[in-house]
Amino acid sequence: MFRFSEHRLQACEGETGLKSATFYDLAHRRRSTRLFKDKSVSPEIIRRIVSAAIEAPSSCNRQLWHCVVVTEPAVKMRMNKFSSAEQSYLYDAPVLLAVFYDCSLENHNPCKTPFITAGMAIYAMLLAAEEEGLGAIYLGGIRNPAGIAKALNAPPWLTNVGVICLGHKADDPPCPPRRPVDEILSYEECDSKPAHFHADIRPHLWTLRQLADFRDKLIWYKGIHIDGLTLHADPDARFSEKYRYLTGRIGMLCAQYEKPSVLDILSLNGALILQMLNTCSDDIGTLYAYELTPGTLEYMNAYFKTLIRPENLQGIVNEDPDTLRIPLPDSSVDLITCYERLEHFDDPAPLLREIYRVLKPGGKVLAVVSNRFYPHLYRYKRMKKRKYALGRNWNRGPERKYNPREIEACFRATGFTIDGMTGLQPVERKILGVIEQLCKKFKRYNRADALAARSERMYTNRTVSRYLCSSLAYEISRQ
């Protein structure tokens, strides 16, 4: 049995039923758990896990860690309120370990040793949780760590460095792809390999290889809840009015064919595919999921196994890492969906040409693009200051937003005929949302509910103002 310390961490085989493992086995099988059972964790196990932290090295051996165990729902709510963490597993996990460190003695250390020290202790606890047969995840994406300190009445000399969510696992996520050692290892000096990613949102700076690598690593971090809501990375609800509209339109388009072959472009986590399988699987012949890397499709298949076992789903991978090429014969697909994926490319023409090539004459495409004219205030602010870092878009990668005239010209230049366009998320809905929040702030709840109901009714918009909607859903066809 792997032990951090013989006298502090005792064998727990009788309690968890685990077999002995080497350190490398333990490190290999550890996963970030986002789904937890509604089952308590004994104080003895919590103490053993925290005992692993005190075995970690610390700067100058000061050992200035402090952990706060939180199990009460009211305290969790207070933590979320003050910190804006807004992660579902902060509530779902039976135990939270808020990790603090006294940074006052080394506040100006250039190597940030207090945070490195705290990080080593956190990793030790994550490994200990795995050894105990539990699931855990380090929650570092907290907008306001000082809010955690405020919620837990921490003294001013303690700095919050994150929260560990801990509990019994309710899922078994597959092993994510790891970079090979030779890719991250060099001797005597750093090698001259190009950067994996860009911290810049503008797509013209990204190569296809970088985009593929970014998406391949992102999906494994993301995770998906069993109720269809994505965890942590993407705020869109999979059963939102927007998705209901899309799947409804897809179902109507499928009804125009006899067992059509359908292709989804750059499916990523397969959210739209899952909706199609749930709503119109019997009406579809073959459903293709096209991705840039096999790892993304592997994750999708592992996820679907927990929810649905599609027999007509077939994953296909881009053939050339430097060139977009859908591995399907010419004129082989009846219907294609492309949900906000053209935005990854500064020039959408290569992908549109591939879509046109594999689409049958008379086939249709449902393409959703982000509208440049919509008041994406965060984006306008960045453009004004010329700060193009991914920032808020770290979970999407590079993207550009198109004005309607520009993207429509791209469709026509490729050879498509535009059959119709529907605006989704009109600007009026954003305005009503702001007013709704103000009503709630001043405790006018009846008025806020009325505004929310009105907002839902205008989720899709077919009037002139559709050109001011957040997303534009185009139905295009090959004649």
Image (cartoon, helix red, strand yellow):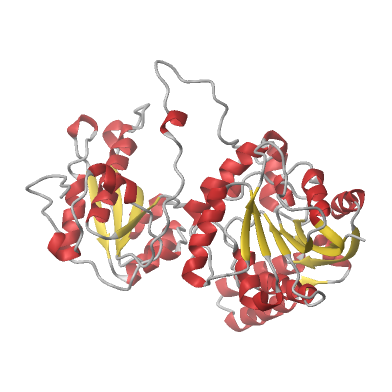
Q: Could you tell me which residue is drawn at 32 percent across and 41 percent down?
A: 119
Give the left or right position of residue 11, taking residue 18 as reference.
left
Compared with 445, 473 (above or below) is above
Measured from the top left, where is residue 19 in percent x and y? 19, 56
**Quadrant of the image for the C terminus?**
bottom right
Measured from the top left, where is residue 160 in percent x and y? 34, 48
Observer able to see residue 158: no
The image quadrant of residue 382 is top right
Seen from this angle, which residue lies furthest front? 329
Measured from the top left, where is residue 43 in percent x and y? 17, 64
Q: Nearer the viewer, residue 479 or 252?
A: 479
Compared with 259, 475 (above or below) is above
Q: Could you tell me which residue is drawn at 90 percent across and 50 percent down?
A: 409
Compared with 263, 410 (above or below) is above
Observer able to see residue 332: yes
Q: Which of 281 and 4 is in front in this view?
A: 281
Total numbered circles? 0
Q: Could you tell me which residue is drawn at 22 percent across and 35 percent down?
A: 57
Compared with 234, 38 (above or below) is below
Measured from the top left, where is residue 233 in percent x and y? 53, 56
Give the left or right position of residue 210, taking residue 304 as reference.
right
The image quadrant of residue 404 is bottom right
